[in-house]
Image (cartoon, rainbow, N blue to C red):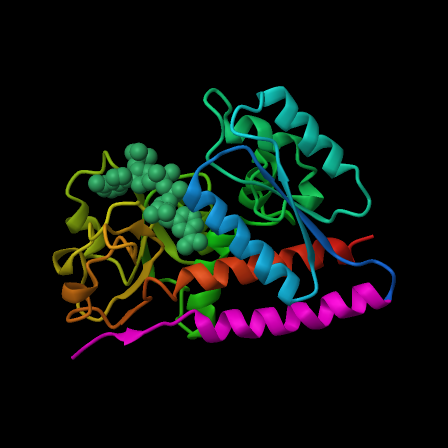
Amino acid sequence: MSASILSGKELAAAIRAETAAKAAELTAAGRPPKLAVVVATADESSAWYVRSIANAAVKVGITCDIVDLGADAAPADIRHKLASLSIDETVHGVILQTPLPHGAKPEDLAGAIAFEKDIDGANPLSLGRLAAGLPAFAPATAEAVIAILDHYQIELTGRRVAVVGRSTVVGKPAAHLLLDKNATVTVCHSRTKDLAAVTSNADVVVAAVGRAGLITAEHIRPGAVVVDVGTNPTAEGGLVGDVDAASVTEKAGALTPVPGGVGPVTTALLLQHTVQAASIR
Ligand code: NAP
């Protein structure tokens, strides 16, 4: 039997509709929500991603400024721009797009984003607050993992979850959010010995690695739920996940697709966070 498909499209549409209603309310109240995306790269896939966020924002009534500082921007200039957007009262959400110029570290620079406007949870303060159980915006991708599991009413309390990947943007915040849901969480990474032995013991596997098809049927216990965060470009111009969908679908109980799973929910949550930030006075 094939795994059921946990599409993110319906959930993303619901989040966008709710966000559009909230954005209209804010605009009517004289507080039109605005998002600023700071870019300092000539990377084409990054430019495509930023344009897709800007288009999605406009569709729900959020203004989106793309602040392009150029691929040779100095770290000090990026930091200065993030700090000035953080005190600009017309801007409610700030994203620092990666990659950054050589020598500029996102975790250093994102500290200049006011945490109230840090709608993609990039400021280390946001991750710290998240870990401490204090209000903060989680990185949208990590939150999207939980949102999809919630949407499909997948119970997490007491379940064993293996998160493959420990980045500060996906793996670690996802692990914190899963702990908050009372899951028993194991975080795996490139030095994990016998990955399949760990993941095949889990009720839920979250793959956030960036290696096409790394997770195969041998990594999955029968009936497990698999969330594929990976987005790996193919030679044909398409996108594949970290999960080998062809083999895993024959063994798992449920699987998020790539594309159409975590990705659309991530974008919708960035917009939702922006109106939430604009709602706080
Ligand atoms: P990253 O910063 O490169 O982190 C990758 C993680 O995977 C690291 O913790 C690394 O371990 C681990 N890893 C690498 N090879 C491994 C292996 N063979 N076995 C086990 N673990 C291994 O990547 P990221 O930013 O977290 O992104 C992960 C994936 O999610 C990428 O495909 C990215 O494109 C995708 N993504 C998708 C969205 C979305 O909206 N859908 C958003 C963000 C990212 P070490 O720590 O030991 O190096």
Residue 8 in magenta?
Answer: yes
> In the image, is residue 214 above or below residue 158?
above
Horizontal side, residue 113 vs residue 196: left or right: right
- Magenta stretch: helix, strand or loop mostly: helix
Q: Position of residue 51 (x, y in %)?
A: 54, 52
Quadrant of residue 80 within the rendered picture: top right
Residue 214 in magenta?
Answer: no
Q: Residue at x 25, y 36 (%)?
A: 190
- The region drawn magenta spans 1-28
Quadrant of residue 123 within the rendered picture: top right
Say how many tags the image has: 0
Horizontal side, residue 95 vs residue 185: left or right: right
User: Is residue 166 visible to the viewer in this orientation of the structure?
Assistant: no
Q: Residue at x 52, y 31 (%)?
A: 106
Q: Residue at x 28, y 76 (%)?
A: 4
> In the image, is residue 40 above or below residue 236?
above
Horizontal side, residue 148 vs residue 3: left or right: right
In depth, the one of 257 and 253 nearer the eye is: 257
